[in-house]
Image (tube, rainbow, N blue to C red):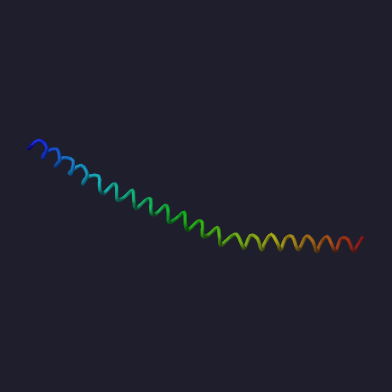
Amino acid sequence: MEQTELQTDQTNVRLLQMKPQTEQTELQTEHLEFRLRLTELQMLETEPRLLVTNLQKLLTNVRQEQTNSRSR
């Protein structure tokens, strides 16, 4: 009985010793998930701007082509 209690106590001590590392790992994981989500949101914010820029370039090209066609 004493041996079992000792083993249980030793196991509990090991678990307690591991707890700070486990908590740190969980916090690091949460931090990485947050950064990933932030990056995804930034990409969503950037996509429409890129689309507008590309459309403006396309429009400029079309106008240039029209101007070139008229001068021929």
Residue at horizontal 25 percent and vertical 48 percent from the top: 19
Indicate the quadrant where residue 51 lies.
bottom right
Q: Which quadrant holds the C terminus?
A: bottom right
Position in image of residue 41 (x %, y %): 51, 60
The single residue placed furthest to the right in the displayed view is 72
Q: Is residue 26 left or right of residue 70?
A: left
Q: In terms of depth relative to the viewer, which is nearer, 7 or 30? A: 7
Position in image of residue 30 (x %, y %): 38, 54
Indicate the quadrant where residue 14 lies.
top left
Residue at horizontal 85 percent and vertical 64 percent from the top: 67
The single residue placed furthest to the front in the displayed view is 1
Q: Is residue 13 above or below residue 61?
A: above
Q: Is residue 36 left or right of residue 3?
A: right
Q: Which quadrant holds the N terminus?
A: top left
Q: Is residue 60 left or right of residue 30?
A: right
The single residue placed furthest to the left in the displayed view is 2
Position in image of residue 13 (x %, y %): 17, 43
Indicate the quadrant where residue 54 lies.
bottom right
Residue at horizontal 45 percent and vertical 55 percent from the top: 35
Residue at horizontal 25 percent and vertical 44 percent from the top: 18
Q: Is residue 13 above or below residue 42?
A: above
